[in-house]
Image (cartoon, grey):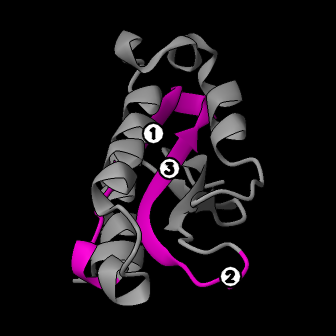
Amino acid sequence: MAEGLDVYEYAVVRVVPRVERAEFLNAGVVLWCRAREHLAARTALDAARLRALAPDVDAGAVARHLDALERVCADDPAAGAAASEARGARFRWLTAPRSTVLQTSPVHCGLTADPAAELDRLLRALVTGP
């Protein structure tokens, strides 16, 4: 491994309005770097694209759930008991396969010297665009 670089894992957060159709909209990224004890999520819901995909979905409710995911990663006590779990355990819980409106991609990994900057880069590359 290159000096100064640490392994990180990430998953894309997806909004899956109708799980039976398996159509989704990327809405965020959650990143875990064990060596630096860095767990964070960044989300960006494109409500117009969500309405185009599923006009009947409550975009406000989806946005609130995305916000809750960010708060769980940020150790926010208002996010409930999950926010007090060990960061690695939280990452595994958040990225576990589920059949709900919010799902995550498979977990991927990489190397970084700056997990926060890498999270911002991933959000731009996978969710918001340049």
Disc 2: CA contacts within 10 A as few (<14), some (14-19) or many (>=20): few
Amino acid identity at mark 3? Val
Asked if disc 2 and disc 1 are in contact, CB closer than 8 Å, the reply is no
Going 31% across and 80% down the picture, which residue do you hit? Answer: 51
Residue where numbered disc 3 is placed: 30
Which is more toward the observer, 62 or 5?
Answer: 62
Quote the CA–CA distance across marks 2 and 1.
21 Å
Residue where numbered disc 1 is placed: 69
26 part of magenta stretch: yes
Amino acid identity at mark 1? Leu
The tag earlier along the polypeptide, 2 or 1, is: 2
Residue 110 visible here: no
Question: Quadrant location of the C terminus?
Answer: bottom left
Which is more toward the observer, 10 or 99?
Answer: 99
Residue where numbered disc 2 is placed: 22
Which is more toward the observer, 53 or 115?
Answer: 53
Disc 3: CA contacts within 10 A as few (<14), some (14-19) or many (>=20): many
Question: Quadrant location of the N terminus?
Answer: bottom right
Which mark's residue is nearer the viewer, 2 or 3?
2
Instruction: Give the magenta range.
Output: 20-49
Amino acid identity at mark 2? Ala
Asked if disc 3 and disc 1 are in contact, CB closer than 8 Å, the reply is yes
Q: Position of 27 compared to 90: left or right?
A: left
